[in-house]
Image (tube, grey):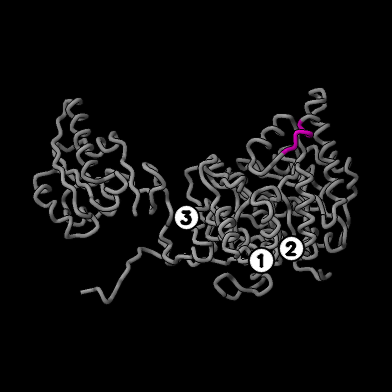
Amino acid sequence: MVIGEAKPVAEILEMIKDFKKVVVAGCKGCVTVCNAGGEKEVAILASELRIARKAAGNDLETLEYTCERQCDPEYIEPLDDLVKDAEAIVSIACSVGPQYCTARYPFVPVFPGLNTMSIGGALEHGVWKEFCQACGSCIIGDFGGLCPITRCAKQLLNGPCGGSSEGLCEVGKGSIPCIWQLIYDRMKNLGQLHKMQEVKLYKNWSTSRDGGLRTTIREELKQ
Amino acid sequence: MTAEYSAGSRLEKIFKSGQKALTGECGPPRGCDVDHFKHKASFLKGNVDAVNVTDNQTAVVRFCSMAASKILLEMGVEPVMQMVTRDMNRIGLQSNILGAAALGIKNLLCLTGDHQSFGDHPQAKNVHDMDSVMLAHTVKTMRDEGKMVSGTELQGRPQIFIGAAANPFADPQEFRVIRMGKKIAAGVQFIQTQCIYNMERFRKFMEMANDMGLTEKCYIMAGITPLKSVGMANYMKKFVPGLDVPDSYITRLKGVPKDKVAAEGIKIAVEQIHECLAMKGIAGIHLMAIEWEERVPEIVEAAGLLPRPVVD
């Protein structure tokens, strides 16, 4: 899923400082699962913004709504009634959400209320980690099912580099496992260590964002 | 290995003559102070066979390795131009390979480079379109097949002697030699190792390299960095991943009066040089006297490595 993290309230307050009435829009998709942009977070953020503005002697009115998803135009539509009375929108979906709002409301300012962090998953309660960079051409089958593009700081395809020490990457002050150590251990478990002797050559990055904005088309589903 | 030269650099000729080679290192400054760079390089001239020019090492911005290599050429010093894949994609890298060859630079060291989080611009974007293994393969393909990564034919092939680094002390230990083997398979002709302090572990690394036949296919140079002070030894031990400086060296440095620490550090380096040169499969020494270039003549003299070989 897409992992999001709330922006500092001060940053959001700065974005909306010129407005008196804003919509705070959440999303019931990924960001609900990672506790960053669901119904509960909408209520908390709206209340924090109101309290801060009240304390500053500049009252703010908030309108709250949490969309089924913000990555489908039809689920943005329910915001129409709220938006017509508001001066701006703060979306706390992943960054797809604010852009869908922007597309639907050409004359209403839209601001992101969270930072989109990664495509990842939960490791434990309150901890999420990145697992994919959406390079558009998955190669993890060659690496024991682990992704060196995302999880190696240098995106090596012929790792590990000289900075792998006791299972840890030299980047991240001991907080990041060396993915190449994990790949090595995994290949050993699978009896495929010999495959690590193969020289891996150039990756085709044209399927990644390097090739320009990506559009995925499924002809059989198109209407 | 054949007597035919792939690039005909002085370094390649010395290796192929069967003599032990000696390379030094000279880091360009964090500015464009050419005189300072030339001053440092002047201590290396005649005392080593070729001089590595670092490419924004530890991800700290310095003047570029190609310009510095050209300056060395003008001084009559043979450069080993270092090139990292951190800052350029395949377009930039190939362009620089061709540019370097056009300037007469004949030795290239293919590296991935230190992560930018260690440098002076931690907010920079990195590239990593390629890694060091691919870069070596690129140079070889350009030189031997006259083609770019894309398959485009070159007009004029770069005559480059291809080098890379190896760290025998990182993990997983048993994979370090295999990874060096991958670099050699990709086209690397000479290897310079990370600074060696743990001689025992290095000895094992070389035994494995010999057993795998890698020393028959590639010239391996042992990396030696003299310890200037107790502080430097402790820093290397604690903060440089995979660099285990044995306590015995630190005890030795601590055991001499303060004004004799540097001399003791040089003494240790000279012992290490002799020990490495005696190992089977070692084709030379890469002496990295970091910001200590002025002591290189003395170290090389003490190690009995002068005069340097003369080649045509």
How far separated are the C-alphas under marks 2 and 1? 9 Å
Q: In which quarter of the image is residue A6?
A: top left
Q: Residues within 10 Å of mark 3 (few under 14, many from 20)?
A: some
How far separated are the C-alphas under marks 1 and 3? 24 Å
Q: Please tell me whether residue A73 is drawn above or below residue A38 in the rendered image.
A: below
Q: Which residue is drawn at 51% across and 57% down?
A: A148
Check disc 3 and report the residue beneath it: A150
Q: How crowded is mark 1: few (under 14 residues within 10 Å), some or many (20 or more)?
A: many
Query: What chain does mark 2 sit on?
Result: B
Query: What chain does mark 1 sit on?
Result: B
Disc 2 marks which amino acid?
Gln
Picture coordinates of residue A66, whole percent (x, y)? 18, 48
Q: Is B249 colored magenta in this rendering?
A: yes
Picture coordinates of residue A5, whole percent (x, y)? 33, 43
Q: Residue at x 79, y 45 (%)?
A: B199
Check disc 2 and report the residue beneath it: B189
B4 relative position to B117: left or right: right
Tag on residue B186?
Answer: 1
Picture coordinates of residue A91, whole percent (x, y)? 23, 47
Image quadrant in which the N terminus of chain B is located: bottom right
Query: What chain does mark 3 sit on?
Result: A
The magenta-colored residue range is B245-250
B46 relative position to B151: left or right: right
Disc 1 marks which amino acid?
Ala
Q: Quadrant of residue A88?
A: top left
Disc 3 marks which amino acid?
Thr
1 or 3: mark nearer the eye? 3
